[in-house]
Amino acid sequence: MTAQPSPGTSQDAARLRPRRSCMAVPGSNPRFLEKAQELPADQVFLDLEDACAPLAKPEARHTIVKYLNKGDWSGKTRVVRVNDWTTEWTYRDVTTVVEGAGANLDCLMLPKVQDAGQIHALDLLLTQIEKTMGYEVGRIGIEAQIENARGLVNVDEIAGASPRLETIVFGPADFMASINMKTLVVGEQPPGYPADAYHYILMRILMAARTHDLQAIDGPYLQIRDVDGFREVAGRSAALGFDGKWVLHPGQVDAANEVYSPSQEDYDHAELILDAYAHCTSEAGGKKGSAMLGDEMIDEASRKMALVVSGKGRAAGMRRTTSFQPPEA
């Protein structure tokens, strides 16, 4: 059973909101919660899971509610990561946070998702809270984190489990442990393997996400002071088409925003393709199905590719530096 979005909700827009940099913030640390509001991260998730010690979790719920309600999170997607369904904390995480600050919350992140039933359960609980509290039913989204082999095998069903889903997130540390990967450095290639050990995992997540029009988010790079290493790892998932990556330190935020945004040259080129194609298919442009843009032939497929790049550039606040001039008849 899944909740259906209310008429007039902006669910499609929510799925497209920028998530180039997703800042992890311990929900039990007021100083970090204050600092996170000042950072240029697209998304901030306040963590009740791994970043909170078990004894700190009950109080951290109330701390998160306080900061969601009083903080200035302007321009940021506001997310709370609850504990996974196999623990004793999940139910109270959800009820305390959503009842206390649901009006100032965009999504809940569910870690260690292993099957679609876990998404159904969260969806149903959210629906009951929204109805009880008088919130718009279906507005609060879900981010599903894939962290073990079972979750990856079931990722297609998970991605289609609820209309609330906005993203599929890769959790590398737990995943590496679940498959006995031979390395202790999260995000780095295991010694002895000559290729990219994460390629299949990332592509599997990406295909499931795109099948259901969701965003795909890469997990953290734990060598927080190695910004060059972060850029290299982020560049791999960005090249595949991922929308963003977790950041654990303020020094990683600018790098993530840059890596997951198009270059100025690519953004300008994409906008020119869109303008040129709109012109060539118009009455004034001769109602043609294809045209030349400089030495490049463009057609409907070109338009679709350009839409992706231009959409990411516009979401990042980029401004074009070129303009289209229709060819003379």
Image (cartoon, rainbow, N blue to C red):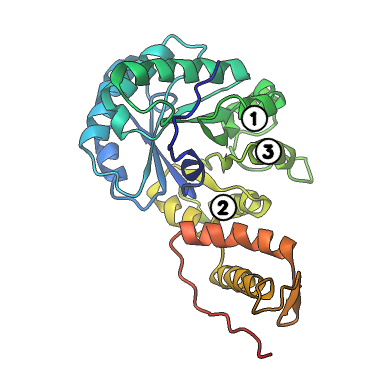
Graded by Cα atoms within 10 Å as few (under 14), some (14 to 19) or many (20 or more), the crowding at tag 3 reads few
Which residue in the structure is indicated by mark 3? 211
Residue 32 lies in quadrant: top left
Q: Nearer the viewer, residue 110 or 289?
A: 289
Q: CA distance from mark 3 to mark 2?
A: 30 Å
Q: Quadrant of the C terminus?
A: bottom right
Graded by Cα atoms within 10 Å as few (under 14), some (14 to 19) or many (20 or more), the crowding at tag 1 reads many
Q: Is residue 76 left or right of residue 224?
A: left
In the structure shown, which secondary structural element does the residue marked by tag 1 occupy?
helix
Q: Residue farthest to the top?
A: 88
Q: Residue farthest to the bottom?
A: 328
Residue type, numbered disc 1: Met
Q: Mark 1 vs mark 2: which is more N-terminal?
A: 1
Q: Determine if residue 251 is in view.
A: yes
Residue 96 lies in quadrant: top left
Q: What's the mark number on residue 176?
A: 1
Which residue in the structure is indicated by mark 2? 229
Q: Nearer the viewer, residue 19 or 286?
A: 286
